Image (cartoon, coloured by chain):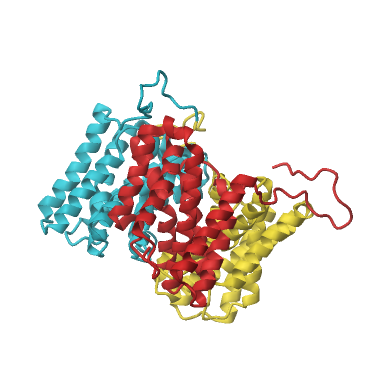
Chain colours: A yellow, B cyan, C red
Amino acid sequence: MTPAVPLEPVLEILAVFVGALSGGLAAVRKQFDVFGVLVLAWAAGLGGGVLRDVLIGATPPVGIADWRLIAAACLGGAVMYLFHPRLERARRMIAVLDAGALALFTVAGTIKGAELGAGPVAAVCVGGLTGVGGGVLRDLLTGEVPAVLHQRELYAVPAIVGAALTSTLWSTGALTVVSVTVAVGVVFGLRLAAMRFRLQAPGPWTGMTWGRRRGSGRMDA
Amino acid sequence: MTPAVPLEPVLEILAVFVGALSGGLAAVRKQFDVFGVLVLAWAAGLGGGVLRDVLIGATPPVGIADWRLIAAACLGGAVMYLFHPRLERARRMIAVLDAGALALFTVAGTIKGAELGAGPVAAVCVGGLTGVGGGVLRDLLTGEVPAVLHQRELYAVPAIVGAALTSTLWSTGALTVVSVTVAVGVVFGLRLAAMRFRLQAPGPWTGMTWGRRRGSGRMDA
Amino acid sequence: MTPAVPLEPVLEILAVFVGALSGGLAAVRKQFDVFGVLVLAWAAGLGGGVLRDVLIGATPPVGIADWRLIAAACLGGAVMYLFHPRLERARRMIAVLDAGALALFTVAGTIKGAELGAGPVAAVCVGGLTGVGGGVLRDLLTGEVPAVLHQRELYAVPAIVGAALTSTLWSTGALTVVSVTVAVGVVFGLRLAAMRFRLQAPGPWTGMTWGRRRGSGRMDA
């Protein structure tokens, strides 16, 4: 997470902290002990970056090597462990902060992938994965199906759009503080719009049949 | 996936496509949205190769870097999303194609592992993992226990046999277009035979006791 | 797993074998077939080391490359598959052996991380992960929430303490056969004490509210 365009370390640490809150909350809801809460906070805050670094060969990943980021994740977990009844009520604010973390992680992850020579396609993949990976790891470790895969409200789509935009900016040499800020704003704005207007991905499709449409298309799992 | 013996890129792309169908089907059955279907298709079609590349240090993995393979996986997901009622009925044909994908992935994965200096044992491991890894990832992401671990019909065994055969061919310098084709055919044939004759791995064992056999050996979980 | 301080290969192989027993037992309880039992044994015995090696870039991981370790893991799985009714009754002894495996894995993993230049923080992380990672993988593959995250009896804490101690010894150049033995003994002793005296991590916290304490703090998941 050392992009050429300096992403304020303060912002990065804040993003990890916010991501960690969602992990801590999931662990508290599952009645995990304090250690489990801290691990889930770490997984949610830094898991996306760890996956990214493993995929692009940047070992050891910052998520296990940079003590400031680890401290930020643990702090997020500890705060959620101690104050979760109050923070439950601030869920809306946390969701907005989480949208900001998604935006920062995605753009920073794409830039890091591109800089390490991952190529434009891989940069988009690792950028999007940096954004959503922490949440996927959080859900797997709590025994849930990853929310990003079945909760229809747009979450990954803003990340993919932002990663594609950032990768294009990088490839064309147009990556400046201004354009990076715009890319972060696009992800953030799309995610906020998805929350505000309940933008959803198309759900289960009844299925297209070449002859005629089926009466009932819902599939039995 | 650039074996010395040229595995027809068309075959490789087809294998990814077929693998992706199984992921798309699992996602459709879980009522995932269209994005979740595409991700599951990607995971099932390319997850084995991504695990292989991470384990042998070939980063970034082709599964996130080669746009043709990603496109093949997404196409598989899209086809399953749109046409799943019809494809459900073609399940038998998909299973046969899947046996072909298993064979291609296993042999190609073993060769790539051997070429990157993984050593014969590791080459067998990554070869087998390339074959079955996509299915494991698909099952984990849909909240299922990996089918390969508990569905007794032989699936991993053909992969391991084929990987061992391929690794032996590579070590002895006997890897030719003909011998690779034979190895692919062995995996494919074993898997088809397992399906046709319901060949099963030994199931839960009642347990051996040194003194005398127990009357009832089924364990309570 | 080639620490500068020679960890007796016999001990290492024994640790893998013992770790594999816990994986085999979990698989037997889930009624997996013989192949699933062997894979779970491999995952529990060698998964922590594989995660460690991937995170520090030591590819291919010893867990897929060293046939002696793979054989030890498979032997553990086979023994559990064949003799599980009798071994169930020896659960207490297995738990003690497992504490020894935790200690050996943690200290050896920390040293390997440090030697490969992971830095002190990352060395502690990969050391602890080497110790607990096999169990996490075992639980995920059997569809369980990782026990280390929610079973309150201390398991990860001894590993983290031991990893921090080992990393400190390495950083200060104080790593000798004696000090390594002490570090292993600390992890082993802490884990045994946790089992004997039921030492537990703080559980779900009722939550701190700034105004007044809540009457009922248990959260509904």
- Asked whether the viewer can see residue A164, the reply is no
User: What count of labels does the image hold?
Assistant: 0
Residue B79 picture quarter: top left
Q: Is residue A1 above or below residue B5?
A: below
Front residue of this view, candidates C117 and A42: C117
Which residue is the extreme one toward the top? B215
Residue at figure coordinates x 26%, y 45% from the top left: B160
Q: Which quarter of the rendered picture does the N terminus of chain C lie within?
A: bottom left
Q: Mark yes or no: residue A175 visible.
A: yes
Locate residue B29, reporting x and y percent: 47, 37
Q: Position of residue B66 (x, y in %)?
A: 34, 62
B54 horizontally vs B13: left or right: right
For the C terminus of chain C, give its image quadrant: top right
Q: Is residue B96 placed above or below C73 in the rendered structure?
A: above
Quarter assignment of residue C196:
top right
Give the residue at the far right of this rendering: C211
Q: Which is more toward the observer, B204 or B2?
A: B204
User: In the drawing, does residue B37 fall left or right of residue A201?
Assistant: left
C132 on left or right of C62: right
> Which residue in the rendered view is the most extreme toward the front?
C178
Q: Position of residue A163 (x, y in %)?
A: 51, 66
Residue B27: give x, y in percent of width and height: 47, 42
Q: Is residue C20 left or right of residue A205?
A: left
Nearer to the camera, B147 or C26: C26
